[in-house]
Image (cartoon, rainbow, N blue to C red):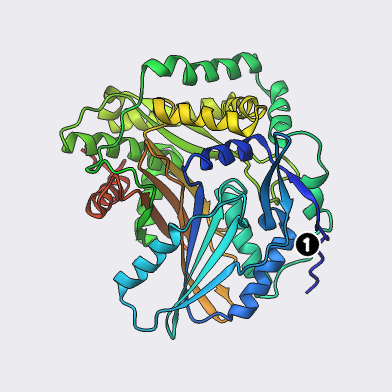
Amino acid sequence: MSQHVANTRNERIPLNCVDKCLVALDSINEPMLIHAVVLLDGDVDPAKLTKAILFAQEAHPVMKTIVRTRLFRTCREVSDIQGEVLTVRDLPDADETEREACITEWLNRRLDPTRQLPVRVLFLRERSNATTLVFTFHHTATDGLRAVLFVRTIIESYNDSLPEVPPSLAKVRMSRQGDELLAFAHSQRSKVEQYYRKMLSSILRRFVIDFFRPPTRAYHDRSGRSKELSLVYETLDPQKLGLVESNARTAGVELNDLLLAACYRVVDDWNREHGRPVNRVRIMAPVNISPKGFRSIVSNQASWLSITTTPEERADPEKLLKRVREHSVMAIRDRIPFSLVYFFYFCSRFPLFVMRWMCIFLMVTRTYVDTILITNLGLTWPQPGTDEPAITHIGSARIVNAVGSAPVVTPMGLSISVGIYNRHLNISLTYRPGMFSKEKARSFLDMYVREILSYGSGATS
């Protein structure tokens, strides 16, 4: 195997506007962490895994950088920080509770992007035939899709199955001029009539008009201020996934539309069940806006849609599904996710300390933060032209499953991440124990699973 990577020592990587805004958000104690939990049947060689991680960092040098601010300008510097990216722990006699506690402790370790590399890996050996790998990424360096790309690079390097890395790959972000997301946003002008008017209208609607129409919050049974996280998840087997896909096809929508519509109804039912009022629910759904030439580069290349629904629309499952589908299609057609790129770019022109105060304002007002975040990463490591996985093993260890975890912002208190591996639909709920008890979090997730299984089948109430 040829593994050609460029020498990137003593070089800087520019931050795009989304990177900078996430750095500011993280700096006000809103941890921006993404996690991927890979469950294995079999053992992995720690030394070989370390080498694979180092190779992936050379191929994607953003993962060996730290954030620096000099003369009011923020960038990433390729660093030679010494320290193990891989942490190995043995739990030979551990039960499920101890395993969960170990993973939870790992999820809540502080990762300071100004002092530490933006990736770390936990290698948890539970028994002779079971291993868990937890990959943690700082969101200031990558989005969810590119985090999965980085993990794939590690696995392929470990398996000696990685094709030659183009010499130019590591240099793309270092050699560019300007912000790649802003340039990509400008390129959409010719594809949409009255493009800039629609961008401005979207920004004004979210940050001016919606100030007077704050979204409903999902009821939580605690009021703590702790930023610690915990995770619960559910895996639907291929038969149940087939049922959900069939219901989506019957309704004439995409799977993502059904997952999103079900989330609205669950927030509605959840609050009513706990005697709380429900008015406008607005859900944040990330979308991929990767510019051409950057799709194989690890960085942030995502914006999001925020669709608002009323109680009347949520009362009728078919009407809600139609509303979600039509709004999504229209928003993508009009390139509405790029409106946030313009907003982020405006914010990123200020020094970091000013951006911090902007983030504090957004958190204090709470109005601009959506009810909940739901992200669907789609198929994990698919073979071209099929929904079967292209990667099924790490060495001799079989990959049993792969589960993701999205960041959680204070006013939300929880987020949902969805992905498919080997025809298994994984739904994870990341929550703040300071706001939700474990029982409440599990209850919310169970309610969501029931909703997506019944949605469109005639069983939805």
Look at the image and tell me in which quarter the N terminus lies: bottom right
Asked if 307 appears above or below 295 in the picture, the reply is: above
Is 2 placed above or below 374 here?
Answer: below
Q: Is residue 460 left or right of residue 154?
A: left
**In the displayed structure image, the side of residue 366 where residue 63 appears, left or right:** right
Residue 157 position by quadrant: bottom right
Closer to us: 268 or 64: 64
* Residue 24 seen anywhere in this rendered image of the structure: yes
Q: Position of residue 25 (x, y in %)?
A: 52, 38
Q: Residue at x 53, y 71 (%)?
A: 87
Residue at point 33%, 43% (across, down): 225
Q: Residues within 10 Å of mark 1 (few under 14, many from 20)?
A: some
Residue beneath label 1, please? 165
| Number of marks in the rendered image | 1
Is 82 situated above or below 405? below
Q: Which residue corresponds to the image point at 43% horizontal and 31% vertical from the top-left?
A: 363
Front in this rendered view, residue 181 or 290? 181
| x, y percent for residue 458 | 25, 41
Q: Residue furthest bottom?
A: 128
* Secondary element at image label 1: loop
Q: Position of residue 223 (x, y in %)?
A: 26, 41
For badge 1, the amino acid type reads: Val
Q: Nearer the viewer, residue 406 or 325?
A: 406
Q: Quadrant of the C terminus?
A: top left
Tell me which corner region of the image, top left, top right, bottom left or bottom right, holds residue 148: bottom right
454 over 242 or under it: above or below: above
